[in-house]
Image (tube, helix red, strand yellow):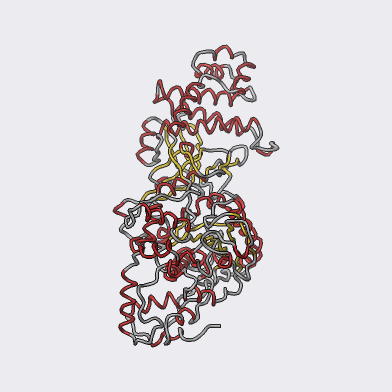
Amino acid sequence: MEPVHFEPRDATTGWRRGVLIALVALAGCGTARVHRSHLRMAVDRTHSLATSRVPGPMTSAVLDRQDLASITGLVWPGRAADALEDSGAAFSDPDGLLALADLRAKQARRSEVYARRDAPALYLDAIEAASLYLAGIPVSAMRDPLLDPREQEGRMVYNTAVAGFLRAAAGTWMRFDQDWRAKMEAQGIQVRMSGDPGAWDPDHFDHFYFANDYKVIGIHDPKHADGLGVPLIAERRTPPFAMVREPAGEERFYPRRLQAYPATAILRAGRGEDGRSRVVTLELLDPMRTDQVPFDGGARRLANDLTTPLSFYFTRLPLPQITQIGLLRPAVLEKQTGLYLLHPYERGKIPVVLVHGLWSSPDTWHRALNELRGDPALRERYQFWVYFYPTGDPFLYSATKLRQSLAEVRQTLDPELADPAFDQMVLVGHSMGGLLSRLMVVDSETTFWDTIANRPFSELQAGPGQRDLLSKALFFEANPSIRRVIFIATPHRGSTMSGQFIGRLGNSLIRLPGLFEATQHDLLSQNGANFFKNSHPAAPATSITQLSPRSGTLAAVNARPIAPGVTYHSIVAKAAPGPLESSSDLIVPYSSSHLDGAASELVVDGNHACLGSPATIGEIRRILTLHIRESDPILERKRDAEGHPAAVGISTSPKDGDHDRPRK
């Protein structure tokens, strides 16, 4: 997996840049991307125009049966369509409506060049005929609807006509707003938007793009499905002036700069009361919520493309720069730290929270998200969230922010604690993200405080803000909503890389927020010389410092048992042949990534950046499938219970008086 290329401001010489790029191996960065395929678009459109006079095989058979084949020749396909209608064959022949739809779609395609204003209405003629044709093929009568040749041909013509209408009427960068609807109405086409609960509201988006106009690079198994409809990318951008306002409600957990979601367009064409005007219902269905669309003749499989919108999202964000800044200048990204929903919250689906590692960003989960969300069985039962944090901060502090984010998302999305699926949460952490995840499922008692202080917390002299910061970071309880954790290449006992030259250089370049240095200075000056175990620290500890095998923070983490009732698994990478016990992934040795008591441990071939490997993703899929089986009886009992199902709340930091008492 090739590393992300970047130009660090503080290391412009070649050797320093090379060392910093070597550090990126800690992250396991994703390299998949998407770009607009102008050449492919041009080829497709040219091919479409060149073949618009050539009828399809089933259309040709209809014209042969009706003795109309001679009409097609080198004349316009519209003449053949008119002849088919005039002869009555469009309704008398079993495939007459399909032939009519095919010819009208080809006529519309040519009209885009010679009479563009006529194209939308002609595409609607094709959609209307194709819909009637599909309605005459009951789904229940087909052995396999996706493989039935008549269904396939009808679906292809319908989808071609829908895409053609949208391109001709709305363009390539589509906005289905009031202005566009008014423009269509001026042309005698009344557009109505579907109010289906599974449909997107177009007013919430800035643009819609055709997914087929983009090419994804780096994803070897794109997730898309054949079916009815045209896959789109629904894009929503936050205006710069709105970025300064704090969003409210669920919006707090949406990506601020850009959102991109999959959508599938369905058109239902009809006539107005006068018999001449056109009425069109546009449905923008969400394939993450539904895989079928109600249609005359029976519910049809909905077409989808889940990969392209995901890659569109990750590619449009400046993630390489964010990754660098997050390590070297973590204070810059303080406001961006938090939990992010990649799709609106769905009650009843179990949250899976993905936590990236050092020198990384949520893009590291690109390939895994593509595979996991693309699995219909997992998509039906899970919703996938990501946690972003600047990785230069001490990981105890980053874990504090994660703990707060989990509490806030529960309070916002399920304030009555009525969704039992919330209490079956799964965390998946890579590298340092695994340590953050582990800190969500342990009780601190006084262990972490004891690593830095000789006196009880109650005797600490500090300002309210400083006391609160330490209280939240060092005293906490396991989150009772988390039932399973997956550790991937996690340095439970640290990595010697942090103390070697590369780690020391990276550590020297990190500039922690001034808050840490000021707090450290104030605490040392306000309390006696013997209050803290290290009364003369050189500088606040960075994330790299805390990953040292000699780190007192790591020793405290390993001293605390994982809470009862939490199942955990390990995925360990092995970079070279040899005994497992002495192996490593080039960053973390097996002796550090191994964790006693794990329900399973899978060793995969590869280095620390193993997130995109089929073996790693396959193991995550296996564990999530197992979690469904084990969670179902619990969820069923809660659903059957009278009143609201019993749900356990998110714990908060204990009060000062409780800090000095161990918890049982």
Question: In the picture shown, does residue 439 fall above or below 75?
Answer: below
Quarter in which the C terminus is drawn: bottom right
The image quadrant that residue 243 belongs to is bottom left
Give the number of marks: 0
Residue 540, image quadrant: bottom left
Residue 611, how many percent across, how many down?
Answer: 54, 55
Residue reaching furthest top? 70
**Closer-to-camera residue (119/268):** 119
Towards the viewer: 538 or 579: 579
What residue is drawn where x is 52% and y is 43%? 305
In the figure, residue 656 lies in which quadrant? bottom left
Vertically, is 238 above or below 64? Answer: below
520 left or right of 406? left
The one of 49 and 165 positioned closer to us in this rendering: 49
Can residue 420 be spotted in the picture?
A: no
Asked whether the viewer can see residue 16, the reply is yes
Residue occupying the point 45% across, 80% down: 449
| Residue 512 sits above or below residue 121 on the image | below
Which residue occupies 51% across, 13% down?
Answer: 74
User: Relative to 62, is 256 above or below?
Assistant: below
**Image check: 276 left or right of 58?**
left
Q: Residue 515 in the image: x percent, y percent?
A: 32, 71
Position of 175 with respect to 493 (left or right) is: left
- x, y percent for residue 511: 34, 65
Q: Where is residue 620 shown, x and y percent of the image?
A: 59, 57
